[in-house]
């Protein structure tokens, strides 16, 4: 069995750097809290928790004057303010690309109606919303555009400024941007495609590999948005797409008669997990 491994598989710069820094912080401090899951990968989080990191989902559960990690996805502005009021010592590991979006949105909020293209429940989008002021709307499908337009009409803002969740599907973003221009035809629509280049390239590669293979294995956390996108894209080209978290999940899957298998991993998947999957497939493919 031939195995094609995506060159852009696995941890992106932002996540790699956050994980490395978190390891250092946890090593050098007795008690460190992390607000939300550091990355969408259970093994990475489990290892850090074993070393003493405490994950909490609400800032109110962090005792005053504690040390806290803000993860790569970023936090809403209000959380920085609450952290300050609680006297927390913040290690801000927000990815610089996400920070740039926060800065842009904060600058735009006085002049424009902001549209965030992304999943409203994703922590990165929640963080960006927290910098967008009062006049914004989140969409992740074309059928929400009319509602966004009605909200915009109420605001009387001069123009529309569109940003994206960094891990949003590039193709879908382009489609939504075209639709927005059509619906907001009497308004200036400034489209800022803030999708991370690492994400875009990984999605392109998943598309290319999935066209060539009989089966595609996508490795990543079930709650990882960028991994889910890789699954979606692969399914457009390949009939057998397996979405797994670790090599253990592969045991239930059948590779009988498969000649070519492709491997891609999401942005939070550590290299050792990818290695284990390759090793496993190599063994059964001999
Ligand atoms: S996908 Fe891009 S924006 Fe998101 S954490 Fe990774 S490097 Fe940063």
Image (cartoon, rainbow, N blue to C red):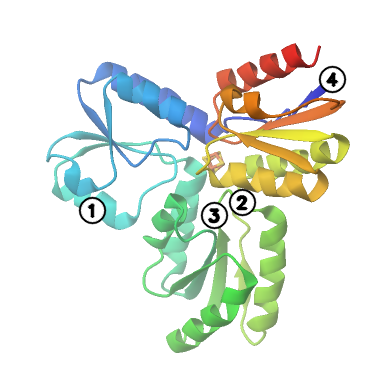
User: Where residue 253 sits: x, y (%)?
Assistant: 69, 29
Kindly indicate whether the residue at mark 2 contacts the one at mark 1 (C-beta within 8 angstroms). no
Please report whichever mark, 1 or 2, sits nearer to the chain's N-terminal start. Answer: 1
Q: Residue reaching furthest left?
A: 64
Q: Is residue 274 left or right of residue 68?
A: right
Q: Is residue 241 visible?
A: yes
- The C terminus - image quarter: top right
Instruction: Verify CB contact (< 8 Å) between mark 3 and mark 2.
Output: yes
The residue at the point 61 percent across, 70 percent down is: 190
Q: Answer with mark 4 or mark 2, whichever residue precedes in sequence.
A: 4
Assign a secondary structure to mark 3.
Answer: loop
The reply to whether the C-beta atoms of the residues labelled 3 and 4 are less than 8 Å apart is no
Q: Please provide percent x and percent y for residue 38.
A: 39, 35
Mark 4 or 2: the one toward you: 4
Q: Describe residue 159's horizontal placement relative to residue 75 as left or right.
A: right
Quickly name the residue at label 3: 165
Q: Residue at x 77, y 26 (%)?
A: 255
Q: Is residue 157 visible?
A: no
Q: Nearer the viewer, residue 125 or 109?
A: 125
**Mark 1: which secondary structure?**
helix
For mark 2, what is the residue?
195
In front: mark 1 or mark 3? 3
Neighbor class of circle 3 (other Cα within 10 Å; few <14, some 14-19, many 20+) is many
Q: Determine which of the numbered discs, if any, sits on residue 81 in the image.
A: 1
Mark positioned earlier in the residue sequence (3 or 4): 4
For the residues labelled 3 and 2, the Cα–Cα distance comes to 6 Å
According to the picture, the residue beneath numbered tag 4 turns out to be 1
Residue lying at 84% horizontally and 34% vertically, measured from the top left: 214
Q: Is mark 3 within 8 Å of ligand 1?
A: no
Does dot 4 land on a helix, a strand or a loop? loop
Calculate the distance from the C-alpha at mark 1 to the C-alpha at mark 3.
23 Å
Residue 64 placement: quadrant: top left
């Amino acid at each position: 069995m031939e195995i094609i491994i995506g060159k852009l598989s696995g941890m992106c710069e932002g996540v790699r750097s956050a994980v490395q820094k978190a390891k250092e912080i946890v090593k050098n401090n007795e008690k460190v809290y992390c607000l939300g899951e550091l990355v969408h990968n259970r093994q990475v989080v489990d290892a850090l928790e074993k070393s003493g990191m405490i994950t909490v989902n609400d800032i109110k559960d962090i005792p005053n004057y504690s040390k806290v990690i803000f993860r790569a996805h970023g936090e809403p502005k209000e959380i920085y303010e609450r952290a300050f009021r609680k006297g927390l010592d913040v290690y801000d590991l927000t990815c610089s690309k996400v920070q740039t979006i926060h800065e842009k949105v904060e600058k735009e909020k006085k002049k424009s109606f902001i549209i965030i293209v992304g999943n409203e429940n994703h922590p990165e989008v929640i963080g960006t919303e927290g910098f967008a002021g009062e006049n914004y709307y989140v969409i992740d499908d074309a059928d929400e555009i009319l509602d966004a337009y009605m909200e915009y009409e109420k605001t009387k803002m001069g123009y529309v400024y569109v940003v994206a969740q960094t891990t949003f599907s590039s193709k879908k973003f382009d489609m939504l941007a075209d639709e927005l221009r059509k619906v907001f035809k009497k308004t200036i629509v400034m489209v800022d495609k803030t999708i991370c280049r690492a994400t875009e390239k990984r999605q392109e590669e998943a598309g290319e590999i999935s066209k060539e293979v009989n089966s595609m294995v996508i490795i990543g956390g079930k709650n990882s948005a960028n991994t889910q996108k890789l699954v979606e894209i692969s399914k457009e080209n390949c009939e057998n797409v397996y979405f797994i978290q670790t090599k253990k999940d592969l045991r239930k899957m059948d590779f009988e008669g498969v000649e070519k298998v492709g491997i891609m991993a999401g942005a939070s998947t550590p290299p050792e997990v990818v290695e284990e999957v390759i090793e496993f497939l190599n063994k059964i493919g001999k």
